[in-house]
Image: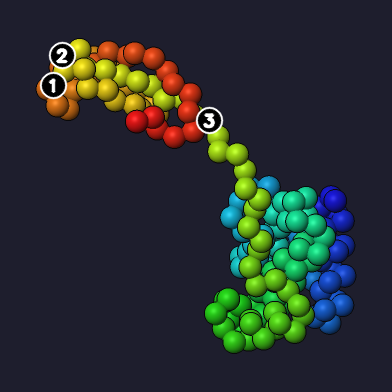
Amino acid sequence: MTNDDLQRLVEQISLASFGKPFRHHATFNARLRTTGGRYRLTDHDIEINPKMLTEHGEAVLIGVIKHELCHYHLHLAGQSGQHRTVAFKKLLQQVGGLRFAPAPPHRQPRMRRWMLYECVQCHQQYYRARRIDVSKMVCGRCHGHLRWQKTVIAEERPQ
């Protein structure tokens, strides 16, 4: 689905469910990670997370669009479009929109690189996600010099 298809879908849903036209822009925004969509108060545009369609289907996408249109129409009517207001909850229930976006499916944790440094004197080991300058950093236990040992690939910091 393209942005033009999304624009037409939002306009159709607005007329069918709310009885009012949608006169602004609706686009997909792939940078949205933790939310299904966003209504922007400044320019009245709606942004939708494309994963609502690709990972959850068209029914979820329509529910998210109805949610954002509730914000849109309440704001343009001069009312508060916040989630906690009675007007928002009532309108959302009337049109059958989603209250919350569904959680993303579980993904495999990403593997990270961990640098292992060791103190020359007391052999204390330090794992760091970022490289450190061993000419400036010293051991926290004995103030000895540090030496890079190896790079470890793991999901979490090794023990």
Task: Kindly indicate the quadrant of the structure image that contains residue 43.
Answer: bottom right
Q: Which residue lies furthest to the front in this view?
A: 159
Query: Measured from the top left, where is residue 65 in percent x and y?
Result: 75, 66
Report the residue marked by disc 2: 121
Position of 44 relative to 80 (above/below): above
Between disc 1 and disc 2, whose residue precedes?
A: 2
Q: Residues within 10 Å of mark 2 (few under 14, many from 20)?
A: few
Report the residue marked by disc 3: 111
Q: Residues within 10 Å of mark 1 (few under 14, many from 20)?
A: few
Query: Measured from the top left, where is residue 142 in percent x and y?
Result: 12, 22
Q: What is the CA distance from the residue labelled 2 to the residue labelled 3? A: 31 Å
Q: What is the CA distance from the residue labelled 3 to the residue labelled 1? A: 31 Å
Position of 143 relative to 98 (above/below): above
- Residue 24 in the figure: left or right of residue 12: left
Position of 150 relative to 60 (above/below): above
The residue depicted at 66 percent of the width and 50 percent of the height is 105
Between disc 3 and disc 1, whose residue precedes?
A: 3
Tag 1: amino acid: His
User: Could you say which is closer to the camera, residue 121 or residue 143?
Assistant: 121
* Picture disc at residue 143: 1
Q: Point out the image quarter for the C terminus.
A: top left
Task: Kindly indicate the quadrant of the structure image that contains residue 41.
Answer: bottom right
Tag 2: amino acid: Gln
Tag 3: amino acid: Met
Asked if one can make out residue 28 in the rendered structure from this viewpoint, the answer is no
Query: Measured from the top left, where is residue 69 in percent x and y?
Result: 72, 72
Query: Measured from the top left, where is residue 72 in percent x and y?
Result: 69, 73
**Colouring chosen for the image of the structure:** rainbow
